[in-house]
Amino acid sequence: MGIILLTTINTTIFAQHHFTVEISDLVPEKGSVYLGLYDKKIGFLKEDAAIAKAKVKVTGNKVSYTFKDLPEGHYAIAVYQDVNNNGKCDKNMIGYPTEGFGFSKNYKPKFSAPSFDDVKIAVKQSIKASIALIGN
């Protein structure tokens, strides 16, 4: 019985999950979508603090990407569509993005960028989330 219990605990603690993100409301056939996956408040939305990043070429009006082998936990996603392929999210004079962007939970910022807690999603099993871009 001890071996069965230990195996169950070990499998639960080290279970790896997939987090699939579908991004919609893209400018069709233009540029790439950049995704950042974060697992903590500190450094949230700082590119070098993302635990995983992805770049997906836009070939229609939506794309999807799967972050694989994630341990159970809370994760937040930030995305933007780099329409002009300059490798960054362009912004206007006051710092608001001029290219489409979005966050997990489809959070719509009002006066400032969201906090990690605003957009975090619990990953306890493999899941799928949808993000509709803002500003396209």
Image (tube, rainbow, N blue to C red):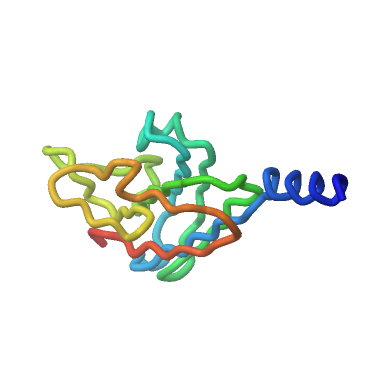
Residue 91 occupies quadrant = top left
* Residue 80, visible in the rendered structure: yes
Measured from the top left, where is residue 69 in percent x and y? 66, 48
Q: Residue at x 54, y 60 (%)?
A: 20
Q: Front-most of 41 and 9? A: 9
Residue 72: horizontal and vertical position, in percent?
58, 47
Q: Classify residue 134 by image quadrant.
A: bottom left
Left/right of residue 36 with respect to residue 1 in the rendered view: left
Q: Residue 5's x, y, as percent?
A: 79, 49
Q: Residue at x 51, y 63 (%)?
A: 64
In this rendering, the count of numbered labels is: 0
Residue 82 in sight from this viewpoint: no
* Residue drawn at the location 45% of the way across and 40% of the way down: 38
Which image quadrant: the C terminus? bottom left
**Relative to 12, is 84 on the left or the right?**
left
At horizontal 61% and vertical 56% (from top left) the residue drawn is 18
Locate residue 135, reporting x and y percent.
23, 59
Q: Which is nearer the eye, 111 or 87?
A: 111
Looking at the image, the residue that sits furthest to the front is 1
The answer to which of 63 and 109 lies nearer the viewer is 109
Instruction: Using residue 116 as the reference point, say whether residue 48 is left or right of it.
Output: right
